Structures are given as C-alpha cells and as structure tokens.
Amino acid sequence: MNATNGPEIAVLQFAGRPLPRPLRGLPTVQVHDDAAAAEAVDAAIDRFRRLVVVGGDAELARVLTRLLRADRLDVEVGYAPPRRTPATRAYRLPAGWRGARRARRGAAVAVPLIRDDAGTVLAGAGRWVPVDGNVVLRGEGIVDDATVFDGDAAGVLIEPLGTAPGLRAGIPSRRGRVRRWVSGRAAQLGTTGALVVRDGVYGTRTVKRSTFYRHIEDWLLVR
C-alpha cells in the first residue's frame, strides 16, 4: 500500500526532535514521555493509516510495542530518525531528510516483528549483559537449536533481520564486532544473572532467563 498525504498520515514527534522538511504539513503529535507515547498511538491508530516516527530506535520500539499490545499491526509505520541507527541498518533505511521522504512516500511491506517475553518490541538491537560488577555472563545462549555460547561470554548482541528467519545473535568483541552470527526465529538465554538492554534502554531488574523471538504477525514497515 502507498500513502503520501494527510489525513492518512500522522507524525509522532518525540522529545522535541526537529521536524524534517518532507513531513511538514502533516498532522503532528508531540510526544514527551512513555505515557504520552501510549496515549498518542492509541489516539492515532483509529484516525490514520500510517504513523511516521520522528525519534530514535527506542521511540520506534515504543510505538511498535503499543501497536502489538493494541492488536493493530495493520497500521503502517514509517521511520524518520535524524541519523543512521541499528534499526536503519537492519532494515536498510535512509535517515535524515531522505528517511523522512521515504517514510512519507514509500510503500509498506511486511517484515518480521521481534519481541521479547515481556511483550516489548525490539526495533534495532538488544543485548544481554553481565550484572553486579561481573565481566562475563555465565550460562547458555542459543538461537533455535544452535549454540551461541555455553559457559562464559562478555555479552550477547541480538539484532532483528528484515527478512526470515527473523533475528540473529552473536558475541561482540571488545571493538563491538561479531565474528559469528547465528540466525533463527528465537534467541534464548539461561544464566545466573543478566540485564536485558532493548534499543539502548537498560532493564531495571536482573533476569535468569530471557527470550527474543519472532512474533506470529509481521509489522508494516514503510520503505
């Protein structure tokens, strides 16, 4: 599907981010915090066919999480970050004014929706990291039936894929590079203790188990 003009499109403008020129003239909602994000999405999904997120990966994830919980993954989502992010790399999207133009004029395609066992969507990158001053994770990480690590690891990086099977996971080096990716539908961790980081946002509690997996329904990304 394709949409280019209001009132089919609304802009969700997060945290005072500047509004890109290609999005001017569209209905715009200023969003300042998590509670406002939920209210803004709820108000918009019944009025607009496409929502354009002006913000970062964490803000995109908030919008997708709200659509997931509202059972409204039929709403198209465009993404217009000011600069490249893990999500733009994962989905091969432009950023800046080019990203805004694409978010307004592009066509929506179904792509895998990656979520965790807490019902939170992962937009660009997730991590499992050590806690309590530890330098390693202790436990086991797997993707489907393949082992990512068994024993100790400095951490695990999880990224969505724009196509099947849905995600990939690997152990980053000190420079942040992953030498071996394992792709699949679900990444699972069993550990003595870890923190979950979702799109740069650290979880508030230690977990012993965590799962990221492909949801049964895709989301509609504007490309």
Image (tube, grey):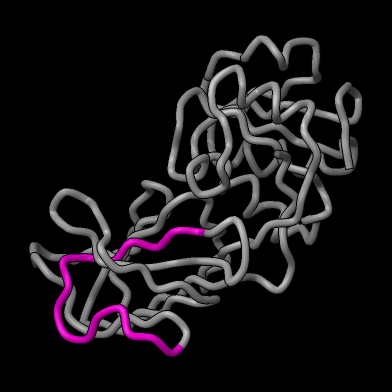
Q: How many marks can you see? A: 0
Residue 200 at x, y percent in the picture:
37, 46
Picture quadrant where residue 145 is located: bottom left
- Outermost bottom residue: 145
Horizontally, residue 168 falls left or right of residue 28, namely: left
Of 37 and 201, nearer the camera is 201
Q: Nearer the viewer, residue 23 or 106?
A: 106
Q: Nearer the viewer, residue 182 or 61?
A: 182
Which residues lie in the magenta part?
145-160
Q: Residue at x 61, y 21 (%)?
A: 98
Left or right: residue 113 versus residue 70 is left
Q: Is residue 149 above or below residue 194?
A: below
Residue 159: x and y, percent? Answer: 44, 59
x then y, percent, for residue 206: 28, 70
- Residue, x 76% and y 26% (percent of image)? 104
Q: Is residue 149 magenta?
A: yes
Horizontal side of residue 193 vs 107, given as left or right: left
The kind of secondary structure the magenta stretch mainly shows is strand
Q: Quadrant of the N terminus?
A: top right
- The structure residue drawn at horizontal position 38% and vertical position 48%, both measured from the top left corner, is 201
Residue at image location 64% in from the left, 33% down from the top: 53
Q: Is residue 55 left or right of residue 177?
A: right
Is the residue 151 above or below the residue 54 in the image?
Answer: below
> Which part of the image, by quadrant, shows the C terminus?
top right
Q: Please identify the residue farthest to the front as the structure is shown.
A: 179
The x, y position of residue 127, in whole percent, is: 33, 60
